[in-house]
Image (spheres, helix red, strand yellow):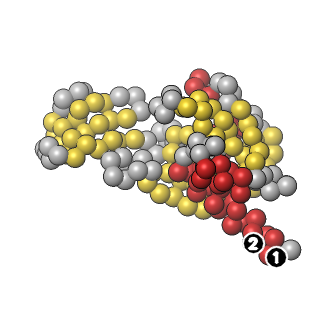
């Protein structure tokens, strides 16, 4: 479909994951499937992260488990599937925030869930998820690493770590 023009929208590229449109001959817009990320905390207050190579940025990142919402899936179903694929866990999902990943040029919308009552439940990795390393780190350490650059993450990981730190502070205040 490359080069297709619809009204004032010209499709520059139409791929498997993204579609690039030129709106009004001026704005480049990436159309991207919506996605989910998951905050999972263990009993000692560490958050689940996955370390994986991200070719788009040419680096290994440390991120909250995340992935695209498949056609026909609800955000909650996608969150459960991603947690099972990436970490071999399932849990009860509660949506705690949602936002656009980068609204200046992309329409990707992210749903971030908190997973509680964690239990083992493994699904096979996606083809691009081989080599994922599962880590459990305190949210304060994650935030410090993202701040000082010793960790490379994502916006959804920042949101998850901030929420985790807030939850743990509230639990400590109530203890």
118 displayed left or right of 126? right
**Looking at the image, which is closer to me, 38 or 73?**
38
Badge 1, how many Cα within 10 Å: few under 14, some, many 20+?
few
Q: Residue furthest front?
A: 148
Q: Is residue 101 above or below residue 51?
A: below
Determine the secondary structure under disc 2: helix
Point out residue 92 in the picture as x, y percentages from the top left corner: 72, 54
63 displayed left or right of 90? left
Q: Quadrant of the N terminus?
A: top left
Point out residue 58 in the picture as x, y percentages from the top left corner: 51, 29
Determine the secondary structure under disc 1: helix
* Residues tagged 2 and 1 counted as in contact (Cβ below 8 A): yes
Point out residue 48 in the picture as x, y percentages from the top left corner: 72, 46
Task: Read off the residue under disc 1.
Answer: 174
Q: Quadrant of residue 125?
A: top right
Badge 2, how many Cα within 10 Å: few under 14, some, many 20+?
few
**Looking at the image, which is closer to me, 144 or 19?**
144
Q: Is residue 21 above or below residue 94?
A: above
Residue at horizontal 68 percent and vertical 51 percent from the top = 142
Q: Is residue 166 above or below residue 35?
A: below
Numbered label attached to residue 79 = none
Point out residue 119 in the picture as x, y percentages from the top left corner: 81, 45
Q: Is residue 47 above or below residue 11?
A: below
Residue at horizontal 81 percent and vertical 40 percent from the top = 120
32 displayed left or right of 86? left
Mark yes or no: residue 78 visible.
no
**Looking at the image, which is closer to me, 55 or 85?**
55
Residue at horizontal 63 percent and vertical 60 percent from the top = 162
Task: Read off the residue under disc 2.
Answer: 170
Mark yes or no: residue 172 visible.
yes
């Amino acid at each position: 479909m490359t080069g297709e023009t619809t009204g004032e929208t010209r499709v520059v590229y139409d791929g498997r994951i993204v579609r690039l449109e030129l709106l009004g001959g001026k704005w480049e817009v990436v159309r991207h499937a919506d996605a989910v990320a998951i905050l999972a905390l263990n009993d000692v207050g560490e958050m689940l992260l996955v370390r994986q190579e991200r070719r788009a940025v040419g680096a290994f990142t440390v991120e909250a488990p995340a992935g695209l919402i498949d056609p026909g899936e609800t955000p909650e179903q996608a969150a459960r599937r991603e947690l099972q694929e990436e970490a071999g866990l399932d849990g009860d999902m509660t949506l705690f925030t949602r936002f656009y990943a980068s609204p200046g040029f992309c329409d990707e919308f992210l749903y971030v869930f908190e997973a509680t009552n964690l239990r083992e439940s493994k699904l096979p990795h996606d083809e691009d998820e081989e080599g994922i390393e599962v880590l459990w780190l305190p949210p304060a350490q994650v935030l410090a690493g993202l701040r000082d650059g010793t960790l490379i993450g994502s916006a959804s990981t920042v949101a998850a770590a901030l929420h985790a730190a807030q939850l743990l502070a509230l639990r400590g205040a109530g203890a």
